[in-house]
Amino acid sequence: MEMVPSTRAEMWTKMGSTLASFMFIWAVFRQYCPYELRRYFEKYAHAIMGYFSPYIKISIHEFTGDRLKRSEAYVAVEAYLSANSSKTAKRLKAEMGKDSTNLVLSMDEYEKVTDEFRGAKIWWVASKTVSPSRPMGYYPEQEKRYYRLTFHKRYREMITGDYLEHVVKEGKEIRVRNRQRKLYTNSPGYKWLSYKQTMWSHIVFEHPATFETMALEPSKKKEIIEDLVTFSQSREFYSRIGKAWKRGYLLFGPPGTGKSTMIAAMANLLNYDVYDLELTAVKDNTELRKLLIETTSKSIIVIEDIDCSLDLTGQRKKKAGKAMVDEDKEKTEKERREVKEESNNGGGGSRVTLSGLLNFIDGLWSACGGERLIVFTTNYVEKLDPALIRRGRMDKHIELSYCGFEGFKVLAKNYLKLDTHPLFDAIDGLMKEVNITPADVAESLMLKSPLDNAEKCLWSLIHALEESEEEAAKKVAEQEEISCKQIKDHDTTAMEDDVQHHENNVSEKP
């Protein structure tokens, strides 16, 4: 009985010594054995073990093909595991998430977690391989990260089909929920240092506007929200009818009526990125197409004040006594004139044409990607070419007009936290007589001093409305005076002509 502990101690000692010797030999082997020979040995060792193992392994690498572009499958798996492993994994890594206010946790390198799908157990491991560095290589460390999942071979069909599809789909949804939305703007061509550099620069999109805070009539607000939500859920519908999954919105109205705020509210409602396209910085139609290709799905492409961006306002006219000039011929002549003017100006400026912009909106190139909104804004819709804003290009026209009483109540709630007040009736009466923009109403309701209160702001708005009413009445009076003067001048001129005509007739008589 006394020999048993000694025997066990000797056994553990021998085992420890053997293990230490094995680790030493393995370390020496990894250090001095050529990398190619070691890979050759590991390859056949894995092949031999595969004959006896009932488990199947699938690797999903971070980079495939283009070394600068991460694999979409890897990114989706990373997002899926970040949500499903944060409660079970013991080693996690943290990254900044949505709105730069929260941290997103995901499994650290070499960590292993277990997932379950329809009764099958799946093991995930985050790993990496480090290949020998190359002196002239672009990536000196040559680290290749990948996720590896292991499962029993009896579940092969289910895992390679339904499970992987489930992981990718849920991972993409998680990424959308956790991502930092961005506001992009296009950079001039001379700033692209290499063909790999993106044509867009961006910042984090943090605009707080929502439809709840917009000064819109409730019925119009509801109509726009329903239209946007229906579009975002209509992927199968657009595929069935054979149209690209995109929709055009034309926002028009006087300055200060909330067109830019509407775009921010649309982006916040749908959780989309925003691409603010500056047409004057685009060299030509080819560059415009390249910009379109680099935009992503779930985004809004915006061209603000399109009537001021380029000379895209030409209306098609009929020549007296002749039929309308063929549209294609007119486009060709216009483009030739623009090219000639461009060469005369020394090559500066933009050469984007109307036909190039039309192809950008709904040509073949517009079908790359999906789930995009294209939004134009203008203060003068009547200046735009009808071909630019017809249905099918700008599918929905939204007029943002002057502030009504319902819009005022939204602003009063936002700025002053008021649902009702005795001065509301006076404001309602004045708003029926005077045009005032939501921007002007908001300025009157904004507290500008610690001594200001809600009533003072309402009186400020009333005074602004009364001044606008007086100015409008003054303009009407001036216009009437001008009209009367023109009529009087016309009558005087006509009378003088009659007198002169009469005198001429008298002098002609013998």
Image (cartoon, helix red, strand yellow):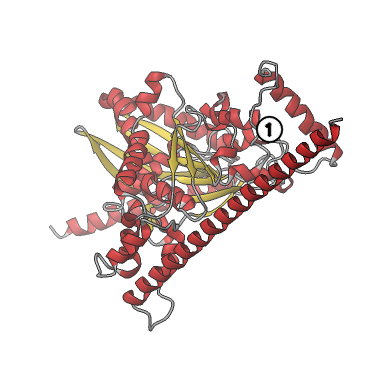
Residue sitting at 82 percent across and 32 percent down?
A: 340
Residue 48 location, quadrant: top left
Viewer-closest of 98 and 349: 349
Check disc 1 and give the amino acid type. Answer: Thr
Decide: few, some or many residues near mark 1? Use Cα within 10 Å; few <14, some 14-19, many ≥20.
some
Task: Provide residue 386's location: percent of width, then percent of height.
Answer: 56, 30
Task: Provide residue 372's location: percent of width, then percent of height.
Answer: 46, 36
Residue 474 appears in the figure: yes
* Quadrant into which the N terminus falls: bottom left
**Relative to 108, is 67 on the left or the right?**
right
Q: Secondary structure at mark 1?
A: loop
Task: Provide residue 382's location: percent of width, then percent of height.
Answer: 56, 38
Residue sitting at 38 percent across and 69 percent down?
A: 462
Q: Is residue 241 above or below residue 86?
A: above
**Relative to 92, is 258 on the left or the right?**
right
Q: Which residue is mark 1?
A: 353
Residue sitting at 66 percent across and 23 percent down?
A: 318
Task: Provide residue 380's location: percent of width, then percent of height.
Answer: 56, 44
Viewer-closest of 148 and 481: 481
Q: Is residue 329 above or below residue 50?
A: above
**Relative to 437, is 322 on the left or the right?**
right
User: Going by the picture, which residue comes out furthest to the front?
Assistant: 510
